[in-house]
């Protein structure tokens, strides 16, 4: 069986996010409105989504941006407001449709430390299994049955990303009990 090999074309780093139709954006916003009862609020509209970052990834990328002289401006994506009105950012967003850590000459200058969402690309995990994002031109030659074998590492990271999302959900529920 063939394996996925990233050609390092940079398309995933330079044309990020915001590909939702108006209907998809409305559905995403509606879904998040149902979570407001738990104090979870969407801080940016879906059409502004780019790379999701955990607070730890954001902190690491801030450090790397200072070391490498990169202009990095993440924005809050999901915020949690507890009963006392204290706001905590649960998830950050890269805040750009072009990754500031991507160089035409060098590619990803933080490749070893790239976020989990980047490590899983072009694979996403949905309720019914793994899917490939069509932004990557290299995904066209793979059938759904080949994904888990051809994209073994990416699937591993997509699982970790999904586990992180589930962990966030559990934390929100626990926070609301306090």
Image (cartoon, helix red, strand yellow):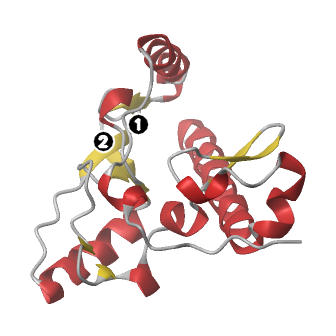
Q: Quadrant of residue 159?
A: bottom right
**161 or 153: nearer the eye?**
153
Q: Give the side of residue 25 with respect to residue 85, left or right.
A: right
Cβ–Cβ under 8 Å for marks 2 and 1:
yes
Q: Secondary structure at mark 1?
A: loop
Q: Is residue 173 above or below residue 145?
A: above
**42 or 96: nearer the eye?**
96
Q: Residue at x 82, y 49 (%)?
A: 143
Q: Is residue 24 above or below residue 43?
A: above
Q: Secondary structure at mark 2?
A: loop
Q: Residue at x 22, y 73 (%)?
A: 62
| Residue 137 in picture, x, y percent from top left | 54, 54
| Residue 128 in picture, x, y percent from top left | 84, 37
Q: Quadrant of residue 34?
A: top right
Disc 2 and disc 1: Cα gap in Å? 6 Å
| Residue 56 in picture, x, y percent from top left | 40, 70
Q: Is residue 105 above or below residue 160?
A: below
**74 or 102: nearer the eye?**
102
Q: Residue at x 25, y 55 (%)?
A: 98
Disc 1 crowd, CA 10 A, few/some/many (<14, 14-19, 20+): some
Disc 2 crowd, CA 10 A, few/some/many (<14, 14-19, 20+): few
Q: Give the side of residue 29 with respect to residue 101, left or right.
A: right
| Residue 163 in view of the camera | yes
**32 or 104: nearer the eye?**
104
Q: Give the side of residue 106 with respect to residue 123, left or right.
A: left
Residue bearing mark 2 = 86
Numbered tag placed on residue 82 in the rendering: 1
| Residue 87 in view of the camera | no
């Amino acid at each position: 069986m063939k394996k996925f090999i990233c050609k390092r074309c940079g398309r995933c780093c330079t044309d990020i996010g915001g590909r939702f139709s108006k209907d998809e954006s409305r559905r995403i916003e509606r879904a998040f409105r149902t979570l407001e009862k738990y104090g979870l609020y969407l801080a940016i509209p879906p059409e502004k989504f780019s790379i999701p970052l955990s607070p730890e990834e954001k902190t690491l990328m801030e450090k790397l941006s200072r070391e490498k002289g990169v202009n990095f401006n993440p924005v809050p994506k999901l915020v949690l407001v507890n009963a006392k009105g204290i706001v905590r950012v649960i998830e950050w967003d890269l805040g750009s449709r072009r990754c500031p850590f991507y160089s035409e000459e060098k590619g990803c200058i933080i490749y070893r430390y790239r976020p989990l969402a980047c490590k899983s690309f072009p694979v996403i995990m949905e309720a019914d299994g793994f899917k490939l994002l069509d932004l990557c031109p290299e995904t066209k030659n793979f059938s759904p049955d080949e994904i888990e074998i051809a994209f073994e590492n990416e699937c591993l990271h997509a699982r970790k990303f999904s586990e992180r999302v589930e962990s966030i959900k559990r934390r929100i529920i626990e926070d609301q009990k306090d």
